[in-house]
Amino acid sequence: MTKKVLDIGGMHCGACAMGIQMYLSTTDGVKTVTVDYNTKKGEVEFDENKITLERVIKCVGELGYTAKPVD
């Protein structure tokens, strides 16, 4: 399992964070996800054998937000 923190852009409210969290939590290979509107960050734990970080970022983009890994 891999855990990454992402900077997420484009969120306007807590419902945005919940929507991202719900969508990613149903994505195959994602074990856990938490998104915090106040900090504009998301933490994703995923199985790299099933999904790549790039795919996780693309999933966030499909919802109309931006995501980039925090170094």
Image (tube, grey):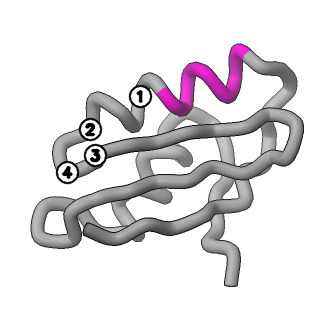
Element at badge 1? helix
Query: Label 4 to label 2, Cα distance in Å?
Result: 6 Å
Q: Amino acid at mark 1?
A: Tyr
Reading the chain from its start, which is encountered first: label 1 or label 4? 1
The residue range painted magenta reads 15-21
Q: Which amino acid, by three-letter code, is at mark 2?
A: Thr
- Would you place residue 23 above or below residue 31 in this image? above
Label total for image = 4
Q: Residues within 10 Å of mark 3 (few under 14, many from 20)?
A: some
Q: Are the two marked residues, 4 and 2, in contact with CB atoms closer than 8 angstroms?
A: yes
Residue located beneath label 2 in the image? 27
Magenta stretch holds residue 44: no
- Mark 1 near mark 2, Cβ–Cβ under 8 Å? yes
Q: Nearer the viewer, mark 3 or mark 2?
A: 3
Kind of residue at badge 4:
Gly
Which residue is identified by label 1?
A: 23
Cβ–Cβ below 8 Å for labels 3 and 4? yes
Residue occupied by mark 3: 31
Please tell me how crowded label 4 is: few (under 14), some (14-19), or many (20+) other residues with Cα within 10 Å.
some
Secondary structure at badge 4 equals loop
Q: Position of residue 45 (x, y in %)?
A: 38, 57
> Circle 4 is placed at which residue position?
29
Q: Which SS class for mark 2?
A: loop
Q: Is residue 20 left or right of residue 53?
A: right
Mark before the other along the chain sequence, 1 or 3: 1
- Quarter of the image with the N terminus in it: bottom left
